[in-house]
Image: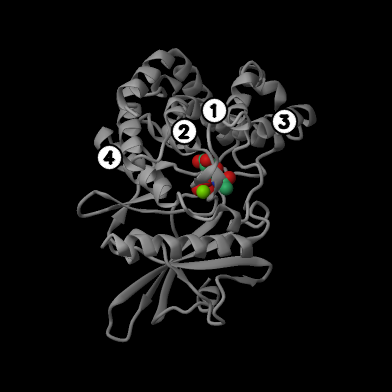
Amino acid sequence: MDKIAELFQIEGKILEVVPHGGGYINDTYAVSCELEDGSKKRYILQRINHDIFKNPEALMDNFVMICDYLKDIVEKKGGNPDRETLTVIPTKQGEKGVWTEGKYYRMLAFIEDTVCYEVCQGPEDFYKCAKAFGNFQMMLKDFPADKLTETIPNFHNTPVRFETFLKAVEENKSGRAHLVQEEIKFILDRKAVTDSLMDLLKAGEIPLKVTHNDTKLSNILMDAKTNDSLCIIDLDTIMPGLAAYDLGDSIRAGACYTAEDEKDLSKVYLVIELFEAYVKGFIEGAGTGLSKKEIETLPLGAKVITLEQGIRFLTDYLDGDLYYKTQYEEHNLDRTRTQLKLVADMEAKWDEMNNVIKKYSNN
Ligand code: GN1
Ligand code: MG
């Protein structure tokens, strides 16, 4: 890995390159360097999974455009762009990334003194994350969407995900379909849910925006000293999308106190006070950026994106674990089950969820 790190404009001598973080798709490393004065400096080196992100160069064009755009806004607000946004370190040839030995790599500056969480720490933290994600969407509200390449087409197109799932059931490449009949039925029974948000978009009731599309809790860095939300990371799936996607993805991943692969489903449920904390923060963070209809559809966003994630995990389980990194045989199935359990719990708490929305929608 040292050789690859050396292709970039890094300072100092490389001391070590170690795996970093827990992404399911790309491989991430922390590169430590020693500068001439003896101090240390770190970088993030990432291998982009180009089976999934088919055009890494276009992805990096998006990435740099967005970083530059955000840096400008943060600077104007008197913030610190080096800590509040990501910084791409170019290659020695001045490129945004590099192909080597058939793989594509990029490098980012390391933002020190931060923490990120896989599991929600409580309503106060979750509120801060929500405010940051709401605000992130606001900051991108005038970003020219037509300049962005769709890095993964139909990423949150739930009806398309549903069709892909049907195909996976039929093909049953892994031979595992007989083990998951209950989960398959759960999804088939909810076809109407998978269509619901797209139908609202097609009917012109909710607008297409530039959204993050992967707003899980671990994609936000918190300042280790102040514990305030600092920087939103993982900009690979920024594409046109719906406000409800970004709220939805955070809710499915954060409005419970368990990890995505928790085996004990009795511990997996929607914590309504976390949902409330997030809704409050997201609406505040987005300022006036959300229409009445968009706010109304936020609970639907949570349900659709959670179901979609369950569909995606189960599709991969049926395909034989081709998409997500897995650590053990049943990993994608455990992940599927937490998502479907959350959907069932959202259905049970549907009125409560909508009452929360009423409380915070005042436009
Ligand atoms: C993947 O790579 P990572 O861990 O940030 C996935 C997201 C899922 C998430 C589930 C490109 O994100 O869409 O929500 O796993 N990213 C892609 O945890 O598919
Ligand atoms: Mg991601």
Residue at mark 2: 248
In the drawing, does residue 349 fall left or right of residue 62? Answer: left
The residue carrying mark 3 is 163
The residue that appears at 50% across and 65% down in the rendered structure is: 64
Q: Is residue 157 above or below residue 268?
A: below
Label 4, residues with CA under 10 Å away: few <14, some 14-19, many ≥20: some
Residue at 45% x, 49% y is 141
Q: Amino acid at mark 1?
A: Val
Q: Amino acid at mark 2?
A: Gly
Give 65 or 338, whichever is nearer the viewer. 65
Q: Say which quarter of the image contains residue 11.
A: bottom left
Q: 193 or 285, which is in the foreground?
A: 285
Residue 149 visible = yes
**Circle 3: element type:** helix
Q: CA distance from mark 2 to mark 3?
A: 21 Å
Q: Position of residue 47 (x, y in %)?
A: 56, 62
Residue type of the residue flagged with mark 4: Asp
Q: Position of residue 188 (x, y in %)?
A: 66, 19
The secondary element bearing badge 2 is classed as helix
- The residue that mark 1 highlights is 304
Q: Residue 16: which numbered mark, if any? A: none
**For marks 2 and 3 on the same chain, the one whose residue lies earlier in the sequence:** 3
Which residue is pictured at 43% across the width and 35% down the height? 247
User: How far across and down, in percent of the image, does residue 99 sit?
Assistant: 64, 70
Query: Looking at the image, is mark 4 or mark 2 earlier in the sequence?
Result: 4
Question: Which residue is farthest right?
Answer: 171
Q: Which residue is mark 4?
A: 125
Name the residue at 61% across, 35% down: 312
Position above or below: 187 against 40: above
